[in-house]
Image (cartoon, rainbow, N blue to C red):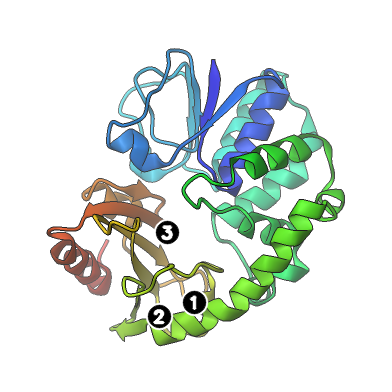
Amino acid sequence: MRIVTRPDFDGIVCAALLKEALDPDLEIVWMEPNDIQSGRAKIQAGDILANLPCHAHAGLWFDHHVSNTPSTPVPGAFEIAPSAAGVVYRYYQASGDLDNRFDDLVAHTDIIDSADLTMDQVNAPEDYPHVLLSMTIKNNNFKDIDYWHHLVNMLRTDPIDRIMKDSEVMSRSQEVVRENQAFGGFLKNHTRIDGHISITDFRQLDPVPSGNRFLIYALFPDTIASVKIRYKGPDKAQVLLSVGKSIFKKQSRVNIGTLLSRYGGGGHDGAGGCTLDRPGAQAKIHEIIQVMKANKT
């Protein structure tokens, strides 16, 4: 039995909760949703999946993405909820395996994963410890696995103030602040507006810049949704597409998770992603943008 989850803040909190509820020695396996959607994932019988699409071998499964809504009952729990961590938390509180010690952590995970942020939290995440911590979690070809494990262990035992004073967290947090300052310039230089949709194309850039994923909505406040395009790796064989609704101007009626599930991806009502093979990718990107512009339910 292993914990299999996604390397983002929600997935890392899921792993911390599952270890605390079940066994602190459980192995954690990190993977992205596309690993399961493409059939590449090697899931073992009895594995516990969280914040990922379901797999036939899973012993337990916890998720909250609308695009992963099961058609039949599955072992574990599924809710359309702000975070997968919240789904895990409620399941193990009901069984008596977790008390209310993680209320604050799960509440912040709900806010971050559902993008229920204020303009100030977007423009100055350094003033909000949980938000800043979440931005230190990146998947650069799984190079940060040791850091993800480090965070899981700290989140099980330490308050947020102590976590933010950890030397590794402090170093990465400082890097995030510098990165966010530069990211605004990249967004301004590589974003065009089509209707009320911002389209950011980073395919000409190597390395691809990263930064605050919500900053686009602060920079372009009249837009109702965003599309970000970049290559998956140096071979440029696949294109990564991220689509999101503005967290400030909430006028988009498209269910993004459902839309992107048609292209092998998925996500929430408000945000999602998909991986496209480069041949034919541009036509599919155009289709997705047209749906976002039409803004129909």
Relative to 178, say whether 91 is above or below: above
x, y percent for residue 34: 34, 42
x, y percent for residue 45: 43, 13
C-alpha gap between disc 3 and disc 2? 14 Å
Disc 1 marks which amino acid?
Tyr
Q: Secondary structure at mark 3?
A: loop
Disc 2 marks which amino acid?
Thr
Q: Secondary structure at mark 1?
A: helix
Could you tell me which quadrant the N terminus lies in? top right
- The residue positioned 53% from the left and 69% from the top of the image is 214
Earlier in the chain: of badge 1 and badge 2, it is 1
- The residue positioned 60% from the left and 23% from the top of the image is 27
- The residue positioned 42% from the left and 67% from the top of the image is 245
x, y percent for residue 231: 32, 61
Q: Which residue is mark 1?
A: 217
Q: Quadrant of residue 240?
A: bottom left
Instruction: Select label 3 or label 1 by which is in front.
Output: 1
Disc 3 marks which amino acid?
Gly
Q: Which residue is mark 3?
A: 270
Q: Which residue is mark 2?
A: 223
